Every structure is written in structure tokens, then in C-alpha cells.
């Protein structure tokens, strides 16, 4: 009668250790998930800021102002502007 009781006790201990190990792994994985989600959120914020910065740098007014101040470029008078039409089959 002692052998089945010892066997059941040993199986119960093995199962308990398995549960403890699985809970530990679960908590560790959840903590890693939260860290990765925070990193994702931070990267999304940075991406949004970069998009705003790109929009600011690519504004036509800014480009025109830099061309004027740094390169001394000016818009030509209307009489000097020529529009060149490409033939329909020509590739730009």
C-alpha cells in the first residue's frame, strides 16, 4: 500500500513543478511582450515625428526660400518662361 501512495505523491510533485515552470515562463513571456509593445509604440511615435519633419523639409515655400537665400536664385519674369510640350509618345 505504500508504493502507490509514494507514486501518487511523486506524480503530484512533478505536476506541481510543471505548473510552477509554466507559470514562470508565461510571466516572462508576458513581460517581454509588454517591453516589445512599448518599443513598438515608441517607434511609431518616432515614425510620426519623422513624417512631420519630412513634410516640413519638402514644403515648396521652404525649398524656394532656401534657393533664394543660399543660392541666389530668382523666379524669371513671366515673359521669359517657356512651356515645352512633349510629343505624346515621348517618355519624360
Image: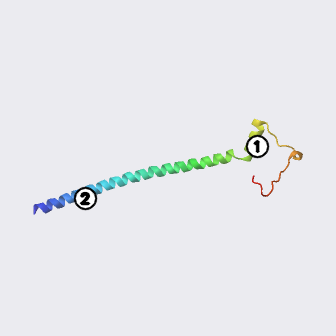
* x and y, in percent, of residue 25 in the image: 35, 53
Looking at this rendering, what residue extends furthest in the left direction? 1
From the viewer's perspective, tell me whether residue 54 is left or right of residue 90: left
Which residue lies at the image location 30% right of the left edge and 54% below the top edge? 21
Q: Quadrant of residue 16?
A: bottom left
Q: If you read the primary sequence from the N terminus, does the residue marked by circle 2 or circle 1 appear first?
A: 2
Q: Position of residue 19 (x, y in %)?
A: 29, 57
Q: For residue 11, which numbered disc appears in the image?
A: none
Name the residue located 21 percent from the left edge and 59 percent from the top edge: 11
Left or right of 73: which side holds 19? Answer: left
* Residue 20 position within the rendered picture, expressed as x and y whole percent measured from the top left: 29, 55
Between 86 and 19, which is closer to the camera in this rendering? 86
- Residue 82, compared with residue 19, is above or below; it is above
Give above or below for 15 relative to 81: below
Label 2 sits on residue: 15
In percent of width and height, residue 50 lies at 61, 46
| Disc 1 crowd, CA 10 A, few/some/many (<14, 14-19, 20+) | few
3D distance between C-alphas at marks 2 and 1: 73 Å
Q: Kindly identify the residue that appears in the image at 64 percent across and 45 percent down.
A: 53
- Regarding mark 1 in the picture, which secondary structure is present there? helix
Q: Which mark is residue 64?
A: 1
* Secondary element at tag 2: helix
Amino acid at each position: 500500500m505504500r508504493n502507490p501512495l509514494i507514486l501518487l505523491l511523486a506524480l503530484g510533485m512533478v505536476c506541481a513543478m510543471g505548473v510552477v515552470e509554466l507559470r514562470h515562463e508565461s510571466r516572462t513571456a508576458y513581460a517581454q511582450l509588454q517591453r516589445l509593445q512599448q518599443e513598438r509604440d515608441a517607434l511609431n511615435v518616432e515614425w510620426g515625428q519623422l513624417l512631420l519633419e519630412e513634410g516640413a523639409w519638402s514644403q515648396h515655400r521652404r525649398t524656394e526660400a532656401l534657393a533664394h537665400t543660399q543660392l541666389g536664385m530668382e523666379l524669371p519674369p513671366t515673359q521669359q518662361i517657356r512651356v515645352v510640350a512633349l510629343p505624346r509618345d515621348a517618355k519624360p
